[in-house]
Amino acid sequence: MKPFEHHYNPGQIHAAWFKRGSMVVVLKGSLRLTYRNASLDWLLDSAPMATIMLEEGECHVLPHEAWVEVVATGRHAALARIDARPPFHSMLAAPMRWLATIARRNGVLFRRS
């Protein structure tokens, strides 16, 4: 998904589903993000909620998938850039892709005898 900008009016609550690794950057105004880990939804109100206050120019990356409640906290509307990128890969994935590329160039990968 490509990054997009979203306008938040003061006092209005906006709820959206964000994937792990999604980034919220406040371009104008201030925002409050409230969420909990989606894997703890079965606990209902017992699961701890995370509340993040973001001012203009600040950024927050979501550590897990969650329904996020976004509220503009200032007197004026807020503008945020949302980058819902795919989840991060493991540290082993990049070297393995590099080795596969080298092996493919040499014609070694998937060769049957």
Image (spheres, rainbow, N blue to C red):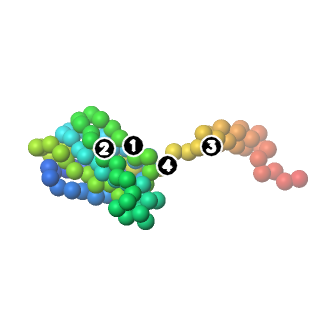
Which mark is nearer the camera, 3 or 1? Answer: 1
Where residue 68 sits: x, y (%)?
A: 32, 54
Which is nearer the N-term, disc 3 or disc 1?
Answer: 1
Residue linked to disc 2? 52
Q: Which amino acid does label 2 sit on?
A: Ile
Looking at the image, which residue is at 46% across and 59% down?
Answer: 39
Indicate the secondary structure of the residue bearing disc 2. strand
- Distance Cα–Cα, label 1 vs label 4: 11 Å
Which is nearer the N-term, disc 1 or disc 4?
Answer: 1
Label for residue 61?
Answer: 1
Which mark is nearer the camera, 4 or 2? Answer: 2
Q: How crowded is mark 2: few (under 14 residues within 10 Å), some or many (20 or more)?
A: few
Which is nearer the N-term, disc 4 or disc 3?
Answer: 4
- Distance Cα–Cα, label 2 vs label 3: 31 Å
Label for residue 72?
Answer: none
Indicate the secondary structure of the residue bearing disc 4. loop
- Distance Cα–Cα, label 4 vs label 3: 12 Å
Which mark is nearer the camera, 2 or 3? Answer: 2
Looking at the image, which residue is at 76% across and 39% down?
Answer: 106
Label for residue 87?
Answer: 4
Looking at the image, which residue is at 28% across and 54% down?
Answer: 69
- Distance Cα–Cα, label 2 vs label 1: 11 Å
Residue linked to disc 3? 93
Q: How crowded is mark 1: few (under 14 residues within 10 Å), some or many (20 or more)?
A: some
